[in-house]
């Protein structure tokens, strides 16, 4: 299977499973709404029925933000803690849902809600261990490039004026960090695909198998991951650009902005699931090729 075939397969499987994209979108939207509700209440309580509300609709006010920060200092401290725990909950929720998604993609056509539910229960624990292993790799990557390498650059150029070499080395560090992060992310996708397709019970074994596969097919794996990753990033860029240029001076324009923004976020989830589907299809095609052929059956010849 080529990279383009895997991408087409991933987009096709996701297109036939839009219900699953909606599950991801809806669950994350509900969790985000639950997190935003206390902040909305605090802002509404502070603004009340004053004219400040109309000013905030038209644009950002630094003066109002400073006043709000001072008056609601205790609330904001508690809210920052809630945001941290919400991040953990987001990670756990999407780990659970991704287990169901990979099960649907691995089983192919005809796999629906039953397969999705079976996957969430069957693979969640193993997927959680994959996430823990990935977190360790992310920590090592950021420690290496943002602490060790950056510290070395700082010491090497401490007594000299910044020059072209320092500039190039700085951006080389950033590029290598970015490359390490996307490589780990791709590796996580293939480790999850390996867990489901080969039904490993050991997350470490799946991670090692996926590492060998990614290294031996590195060019195509990166082409698949980066192509669908760029589509995901493009949907986010369009969302941010639309949020900046769309006027929000009335209830109608706010409603239009909200609906279009949610459609773009739904599209972002579609491309993310398509990346999982492409990884499952590409890994599954090579896993099937590795299966030994059955022994030929020879008929007994009577003389």
Image (spheres, grey):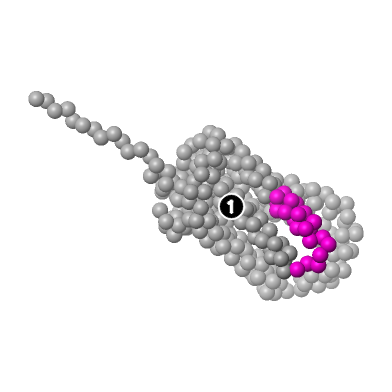
x and y percentages locating residue 199 in the rendered image:
48, 37
Which residue matches tag 1?
Answer: 183
Q: Residue furthest top?
A: 303
Extreme residue toward the left, this view: 303
**Up-down relation of residue 263 to residue 129 (above or below):** below
Check disc 1 and report its element: helix, strand or loop. Answer: helix
Tally the marks. Answer: 1
Q: Residue 126 location in percent, x, y? A: 58, 37
- Residue at 9% across, 25% down: 303
Q: Residue at x 73, y 74 (%)?
A: 249
Q: Is residue 149 magenta?
A: yes
Q: Is residue 19 visible?
A: no
| SS assignment for the magenta stretch, majority | helix
Residue 245 location, quadrant: bottom right
Which region shows up in magenta?
142-163
Left or right side of 102 for 131: right
Residue at 87% from the left image edge and 56% from the top image edge: 72
Comparing 155 with 77, the one in front is: 155
Residue 16 in the image: above or below residue 63: above
Mark 1: few/some/many CA within 10 Å (<14, 14-19, 20+): some
């Amino acid at each position: 299977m080529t990279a383009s075939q895997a991408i087409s397969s991933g987009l096709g499987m996701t297109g036939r499973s839009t219900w699953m994209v909606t599950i991801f979108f809806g669950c994350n939207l509900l969790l985000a709404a639950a997190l935003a509700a206390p902040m909305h209440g605090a802002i509404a309580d502070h603004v009340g029925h004053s004219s400040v509300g109309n000013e905030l609709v038209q644009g950002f006010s630094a003066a109002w933000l400073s006043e709000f920060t001072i008056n609601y200092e205790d609330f904001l401290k508690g809210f920052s803690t809630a945001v941290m725990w919400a991040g953990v909950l987001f990670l756990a929720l999407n780990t659970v849902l991704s287990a169901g998604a990979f099960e649907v993609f691995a089983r192919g056509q005809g796999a629906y809600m039953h397969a999705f539910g079976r996957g969430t229960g069957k693979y969640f624990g193993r997927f959680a261990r994959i996430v823990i292993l990935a977190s360790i790799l992310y920590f090592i990557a950021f420690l290496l490039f943002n602490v060790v390498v950056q510290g070395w650059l700082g010491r090497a150029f401490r007594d000299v004026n910044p020059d072209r070499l320092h500039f190039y080395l700085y951006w080389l560090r950033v590029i290598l960090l970015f490359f390490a992060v996307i490589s780990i992310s791709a590796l996580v996708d293939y480790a999850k695909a390996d867990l489901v397709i080969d039904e490993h019970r050991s997350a470490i074994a799946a991670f090692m198998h996926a590492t060998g596969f990614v290294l031996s097919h590195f060019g195509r794996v990166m082409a698949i991951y980066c192509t669908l990753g760029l589509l995901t990033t493009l949907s986010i860029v369009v969302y941010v650009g639309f949020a900046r240029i769309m006027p929000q001076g009335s209830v109608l324009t706010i409603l239009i902005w909200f609906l279009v923004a949610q459609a773009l976020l739904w599209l972002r989830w579609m491309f993310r699931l398509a990346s999982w589907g492409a990884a499952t299809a590409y890994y599954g095609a090579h896993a099937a090729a590795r299966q030994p052929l059955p022994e030929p059956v020879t008929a007994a010849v009577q003389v």
